[in-house]
Amino acid sequence: MKVRDAMAYDYEYFKKAVFDLTKIDLNAYKEKQMKRRIDTLIAKNKIVGYDNYIAALKGNNRLFEEFVNYLTINVSEFYRNPEQWQIMDKEIIPELIKKYGKNLKIWSAACSTGDEPYSLVMAFSRHLPLNQIKIFATDLDKQVIAKAKTGLYVEKSIASVPDDFKRKYFTKVGPSYQISDEIKSRVEFKEHNLLKDTYPTDCHLIVCRNVLIYFTEEAKEEVFRKFYGSLKPGAFLFIGSTEQIINHKEIGFGRRNSFFYEKP
């Protein structure tokens, strides 16, 4: 086989080229799932071979942004799994305020289009004045961060938002819903790669939901250990309904329930 032919279909070469280009480490993602997604995207763009696709990504900004956006699997909605948000409202938030007071450091990691950090602002607003709430929200993809800052959502995304918050903080704009500046102003967005960048420290609450299911077991464990290191003693990690920390005791976490883990 010629060198060019080998490169065209060599996924190992492709992973290295993607890392050089984007600093996204595809080795951290479940290979079968991710390779299938990427092959589908390449075929959709009528490009043959990984080498040609890499060349196209380097020369075409639209393709590059589409690729990063596609890679960073953005499925999000407000108050996803409402019963877990009830636990947040009734147990976790009051406990955090009792332990640490009102000046809380809250990190929404891999926040996607902003549904989660804005849900956090609303949840905390039942307990604190808005001007005392600050959420630090991060994501790998600058396109979804731009969308989050715009704050425009389809009806399905806000279906689980409590009715009083829908009335108070959303305005209908055509077929969509615009979240209010009051809520938007309480969130600070920033690009962050969970697999590469330095983590915030002394957090009282970290929320990272339904993202790590796409990671390998090794990458997952690395992220959970880093989350543990980012939390203050007595603080909480809130994960998604599709996830669990199998070795939470070994890492050091206590398990409050299926989705809330506490650093003793």
Image: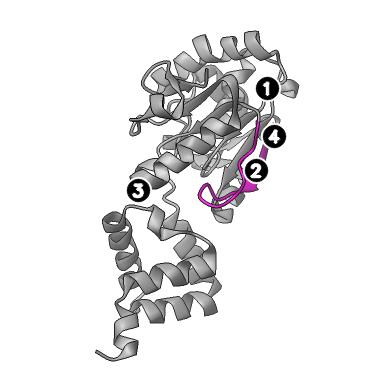
Mark seen at residue 189: 2
Whether 190 is among the magenta residues is yes
Q: Is residue 134 left or right of residue 25?
A: right
The residue that mark 4 highlights is: 181
Q: What residue is rendered at 45% in x and 42% in y?
A: 222
Residue 118 falls in image quadrant: top right
Mark seen at residue 216: 3
Q: Position of residue 233 (x, y in %)?
A: 59, 20
Q: What residue is rendered at 33% in x and 34% in y?
A: 242
Q: Can residue 198 be seen?
A: yes
Q: Position of residue 186 (x, y in %)?
A: 69, 31
Q: Is residue 197 left or right of residue 57?
A: right
Pick the quarter of the image with the N terminus.
bottom left
**Which element is circle 3 on?**
loop
Between disc 3 and disc 1, the foreground one is 3
Whether 168 is among the magenta residues is no
Q: Can residue 115 be seen?
A: no
The residue that mark 1 highlights is: 104
Q: Nearer the viewer, residue 35 or 228?
A: 228
